[in-house]
Image (cartoon, rainbow, N blue to C red):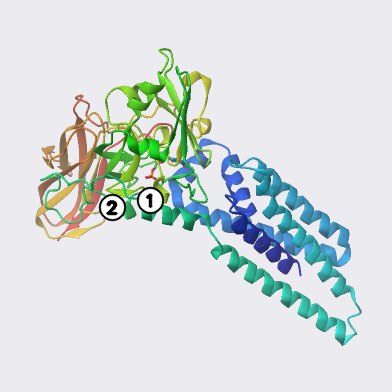
Amino acid sequence: MGLVTALAGIAASQLVTAVLRTRVTPVQAVAESVIALTPGPVAEALIHVVGRNDKPILVAGVTVVVVLLGVAAGLLAGRRPLLGQLLLAALGVVALAAEVSRPGFTPVSVLPLAIGVLVWVVVLDFLTTAARARPTLVESRRRFVLGVGGVAVAAVLAGAGGRFVGQARRTVESARRSLRLPVSRGAVPQGASPPLPGVTPWRVANADFYRIDTALVVPAVDPAQWRLRIHGMVDKEVTLTFEDLLKRQLTQAWVTLCCVSNPVGGDLIGNAWWSGVRVADLLAEAGVHADADAVRQTSHDGWTCGTPVEALTDGRNALLAVAMNGQPLPLEHGFPVRMVVPGLYGYVSATKWVTDLEVTRFERFSAYWTERGWSPRGPVKTESRVEVPRNGAQVRAGSVRVGGHAWAQHTGIAYVEYRLDGGPWTRADLGRVPGRDTWVQWSGTVHAGGGGHTLTVRATDRSGYTQTAARADVVPNGATGWHRVDFSAA
Ligand SMILES: Nc1nc2c(c(=O)[nH]1)N[C@H]1C(S)=C(S)[C@@H](COP(=O)(O)O)O[C@H]1N2
Ligand SMILES: [Mo]
């Protein structure tokens, strides 16, 4: 009885969410609050790394807890109906607190929750009354069973309906499909990839591009509604529509984006051809005050980060990007507009679904990840990794081809060296790159006799810095250390 009640309420709130197109369902709002309230950099590091996987798990977890509490309320209501109702009401209050604290909250967002709780209270009351009728009377038993069955069926229907009825996402997907942007797909430079199967392609396809964000529900931002406001320490505020943005001079460039949470040898990195408007031009139009040193960026879903004014105005291709590899940004990667800044980790620069740029000073604010123990400034560290052979691979003894990627965005890679076991460092062949802002593919050959081997790689950037062997954790500003793989030859 409690189970049916809980499911009915959740399903009803989901249906109302879908019909009203509010941003998140009450359950998702609670799950988002759980993320926001998780204390300590370690817990956050976990969330950051787990990326896309934590979300369905978390939402499922919250659903299970709500359902269990519903069962408890049902059991309670069997004896003390008022207590059962009170438990449900308390649950409603927790969800309400979560919703109010979420970005994009409007009074309308309360409706799904209100209707969900109303359904709970009414259904529980109906079922307890039915259960209390004399069980000896066949008639009332049948009525009870019919009641439970009816509510269960209605709940399933409402839940299913909620998934399909007028989702905001579908509207935005179709707006995205009908966009024709004046962008090119970008040609991969000749010689960027040495012929070595098993190495990640130099251009990472949109569908394969890593994804990191805190959004439980991918924001569905209609380009017709999108606005970017530039304000704060500026001579004059600027507000742009998507159309305004497209009228500006477009810049297109290869830029490699990576995540501060990428462990040594990890794959939270991708390279793409980005098309967008230079942030420097827009900031110049607004007139940045001389004493400002930071831009506080805010996304549609309330995520924030702080970017040095210098990185946005020093001549590099810091872009408000509208396209990725010649396509409008995928929704997951920030449609309709995101920031991309060569040389900075994503957590301090690459705001997806960006809507607000406040020119300010670093000491005046903290941002989403800096509040959780990560550094306010996040320049990319010089790194490299082995992709061939894979760790644990078995290869034929003799001459073995090896390779991978190295990166030091906006500094550039000077050379890459690899070493078999305790042998001498050998310089790798480097793929051709268009500039300093992308990763570089490296390759080479080692002579491996039968048995176990270790291959180690290290890169030196164009400032003359060679990667340190000292291992540092990803918190607070990026991992260091040499990547090595173990393989065996026979
Ligand atoms: N709105 C929003 N933008 C965001 C984030 C986020 O959580 N929310 N995460 C940032 C981080 S930590 C990274 S590494 C990049 C990842 O961009 P991608 O998902 O397109 O690869 O987005 C950045 N932009
Ligand atoms: Mo990140």
Q: Is mark 2 within 8 Å of ligand 1?
A: no
Residue at (36% x, 49% y) in the render? 210
In the rendered image, the quadrant that contains the N terminus is: bottom right
Residue 32 screen position, x and y as percent = 58, 46
Decide: is 79 above or below 315. below
Which structural element holds mark 1?
loop
- Relative placement, left or right, of 350 versus 197 is right
Residue 200 screen position, x and y as percent = 23, 51
User: How many numbered markers are drawn?
Assistant: 2
Residue at (67% x, 61% y) in the render? 10
Split into quadrants, the picture shows ligand 1 in the one at: top left
Asked whether the viewer can see residue 260, the reply is no
- Relative placement, left or right, of 316 versus 58 is left
Decide: is 230 above or below 81. above
Residue tagged 1:
330
Which structural element holds mark 2?
loop
- Relative placement, left or right, of 478 versus 20 is left
Residue tagged 2:
205
Question: Please, what is the three-letter code of the amino acid marked with disc 2?
Answer: Ala
Q: Nearer the viewer, residue 410 or 427?
A: 410
Q: Nearer the viewer, residue 461 or 367?
A: 367
Decide: is 54 above or below 102. below
In the rendered image, the quadrant that contains the C terminus is: bottom left
Count neighbours of disc 2 (C-alpha within 10 A) and say few if under 14, some if 14 to 19, many if 20 or more.
some
Q: Which mark is residue 88?
A: none
Question: Please, what is the three-letter code of the amino acid marked with disc 1?
Answer: Pro
Residue 171 screen position, x and y as percent = 48, 56
